[in-house]
Structures are given as C-alpha cells and as structure tokens.
Amino acid sequence: MRRGVLTVGACILVLAVSFCCGCTEEPEEITGGELTGPVWLLETYVGVDGAMTAAIAEAPVTAEFVGGSVSGLSGCNRYHAAYLTDGQSLTLDLPVVTLMYCDRADVMNQEAQYLALLGTVAGYTISGDRLTFTDPSGQAILIFRMVDQNLAGTKWELTGYNNGAGGFVSVVTGSSVTAMFGEDGQMSGNAGCNSYSGSYVVSGKSISIGPLAMTEMYCMDPDGVMDQESAYFAAVQAAASYRVGAGELSLVSADGRQMAVFGPYTPNPQGVTWELSGYNNGQGGVVSPRAGTIVTAVFGADGQVTGSAGCNDYLAPYTVSGMEMTIGPVGSTRMYCDSPDGVMEQEARYLVLLGDAGMIDRTPDTLTVRDADGITLLTYTLERANPLAGDWLTVSYRDADGNLVSVLEGTELTAVFGTDWQVTGRAGCNSYFGSYTTDGQKFSVGPLGLSMMYCKSPEGVMEQESGYLTALEDAASYKIRENDLTLYDKESNPCVRYMPAP
C-alpha cells in the first residue's frame, strides 16, 4: 500500500515535470457534458456542399438549453424545440420558427441549413468553450462557442426598458442611454440627460446594481427624456439576473420580468452631418438652440470637424478613442450676424463647449458630447431632411384684404429656401433675406431683412411687396403636392403659393 502510493506520487511528479518542460495540455473533450447554462453561438456548420462553412457574423445563430427546450436565433428568425439527452446522445424535436423574411439570400440559406441540421443531431461533445453537435455517424455538423458572460470591461447602449407601468418600451427617439461595467465593480454611463455611477455585484447569473448616484441636470429635449431616465434607474436597480447573448445584454427582475435590454455600444461620429439639438447654458440646463439658427457638425475621416456655428463656419481637429474625445483648438470665420437675436452669444458658447469635449455617446440618430466629468455639453441629431430646399416662383399670395391674388405682370416674387435654413429672394422691388425652420408640416420664417429701394413701376409694386412679405411671415405650415408648394397661416388659410422656378 505504501509503495503503491509512492509510485502514484512519482507518476504525478513525472507528469508535472513534463508539463513544466513545455508540453501543452489539450482541453478535455467530454462526450456529452452540461448543455444548460451557457449561451452558445454558432461558429461553423456543414454547408449544402458538405464542407464546413463559417457562420455569418452579422446574422448570429444561437442555442440556449433551458428546462428541456433549446431556443435562440436562427439568423433571421427565432426558434425553439424540445430536446432529450442522456448526457451523451441528443435528439431534438422539429423546431418551431417565427416567420420573418430577411432580404439577404445568404442569411436565409444559412438559416434553412441550420434548421435542417438540427433534425439530424444524434450526439454532442464539449471541449473547453466549444460545443459540437454530431450526426449518427459521429461526424461534426454544428460547432458553437460559449458566449462570455463576463460583464467587467464591457460597454452597452440601451435599446428597450421596463417603463414601470407594465410595458416594455423602446428608447425615446433622439436620446442615448449607456451602461459601462468597470473592472472595479463600478457601473457608470449616461441615462439620456444625467450621468450616473454606482456599484454592481455579479455572482453566477445573479446581479445586484446600485444604489446609483447621478448628476442633477434637467433636459427639455427630446420630449419624455426625463421620465425615461427615472424609469431606467428604477429598472436597472430592480435587476436580479442577467444574460449576455449574441451582441445583447438582458437584465431580468427576481420575478422574471425583463427590465432592460442593451445592444453593442458604437460611438463613432463619422459619416453623417449632425445638427445641434441642445447645448449646456452654463446654468445647469441643456437648452434648445435659438429659433432660426442652425448649428451643424461634420466629423471627417481626416480628423477635422467642420460646420456652421449659427453665423460663422468653424474648423477644429478632433480625436476619438473609445468613448474619449478631444476637440480643438477651434478656429472660425469672423462675420457678425445681428439676427436672430442672441445668435452671436449662442455661437460663442457653442465654440467654447466644443473645446471642453471629453467624452461622446453615439446612437444611429443621436450624438452627445460630454466633458471629462460626464456633464452633457452638446446634443445633436441627424441633419433634418429639407423638402423645401430649392428655388421657387410665386404664383399667388394673400393681399392686405385677405384675398389670394396673382403676381403683377412684369414682376417676379421669388424664394430660395437654402439647405442652410436661410431664405432669400426678390419681393418685386427689393431683395429680402432671413431664416426659416420646419418641423413636420410646421413652418416659420423671419424676421426678414430687406433692402431699401423704392420702385415706381409697375403700378402697385410696393403694395404687392408689402403684402407678399406679410403673407410669408404669417405662414405657419406648408404642403407640397407634386410641384406645388403652398404656405398656410395658423387658421390653415393659404397665404402664398409657389411653383418651381424655371
């Protein structure tokens, strides 16, 4: 007995020495093993030609085994099927699949092949973080890898949340809510207006978040962002478990309710034109730009950000690394604009805020710039489409008596609605200029500036000019039908009608 023990010990010593001398130990391959628990992501599968084929990264296929059922994504649709296993063999029932159609033929072909292969599964092996399904001959037909459930060091963007009123809703358009799980056990991010931070603790699939502390800003735009923020804080702090899927993080309450779902965080600001939707006024609030001003930002691939600051154009170098951003020094042209009121003060504030940039958040439709402490400085949305942009010729207008009248013979009333939200034109005698805005079908213009000429002919030209400009400034909405643009006043009465200029 004593000698046998020594012999075994010697063998163990020899193995240890061999390992230390550079031999690599292969992951243990287990015929069968524990299927439940992980989320499995498809890596390769047997294609219709019989060769192993890499799965399409943009159309993830997953498998999760819970309570006698396997479910997941099949590339385009979701599926689930009952399964039986004795720890080595594996059989799956015919999958039940949703009936969506994706417009990529390769995705649909992959899905069809995957679902067909599930019906031929006879066994499985687990080796390290790999799961392999085999057919009756023992041939590998589907190979998955385990999705890492470690939250530490990950960054996410909210896609939906429990609103606290029995509903699960999407994020408010124009807002961005982020969550970062630090290596130090701290969760932080931005809830749409305010930055927040607090502790999180993970044990297995269980999670505890909070209490969370936040800044005390108030944001007026977009509508509903403050209510969303309150509901978000309540939702994440009610989470009791979590699950990391294929590019998705779900937080679930103790009673099984889904509290929040996040997608991958991608802060790259390039590729689009951004239009300012709010800026920090230095008094604890984020306010909308002044009516009649358009402030833009274009982040170029050359490391330069350019745009209009409301009156002047500006240019500055920028860098982005993860969530961190620096901008500046900022240079601009040296024009002075006296309208709309306050435009120069707003511009000066905007250029200072650009130089204070320290962090960014990005959604497909929004961009938020914050300082190094997480305070919101600037918010942007994608540049609005401008259906009015172009050259227009007046057909009729509402005169001082409230009647729609045609333009005097020998005169032209024109309007050029620019993509920069400035309108210029001829009013019959004088030139005019000003800013305009649209919001859906809503329209506003002015105040308008005017040159100071006096024209004697044709008769009535000055009265026409006054009537046209008054009608234009009274406009509150618009409609475009084919090639006809009509402006309406607050009572929905037509006040100016245009056709495209030749």
Image: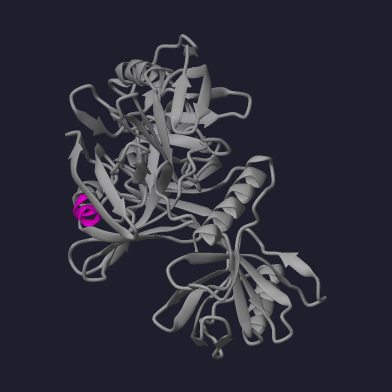
As displayed, is residue 126 above or below residue 366?
Answer: below
> Closer to the camera, 241 or 299?
241
Picture residue at 19% right of the left edge, 34% below the top: 217
Instruction: Find residue 19 and report its horizontal and vertical position in percent.
Output: 64, 46
**Residue 121, picture quadrant:** bottom right
Image mark count: 0
Residue 155 appearing in the image: yes
The quadrant in which the C terminus is found is: top right
Q: Main secondary structure of the magenta part?
A: helix
- Using the image as rendered, state which of residue 390 and residue 119 is in the foreground: 119
Q: Position of residue 68 (x, y in %)?
A: 43, 84
One can see residue 194 in this view: no
Q: Taking 348 as reference, is 361 above or below it?
A: below
Residue 131 relative to residue 83: left or right = right
The outermost residue toward the bottom is 93
Image coordinates of residue 193 in percent, x first then y, are: 26, 39
Is residue 68 on the magenta stretch?
no
Q: Is residue 225 above or below residue 145?
A: above
Taking depth in this image into account, of 57 and 333 the one nearest to the observer is 57
Q: Is residue 232 magenta?
A: yes
* Image point (30%, 40%), residue name: 185
208 displayed left or right of 120:
left
Looking at the rendering, the stretch of residues picked out in magenta corresponds to 231-237
| Picture coordinates of residue 73, whole percent (x, y) | 53, 71
Q: Nearer the viewer, residue 58 or 175?
A: 58
Residue drawn at x 40%, y 12% is: 336
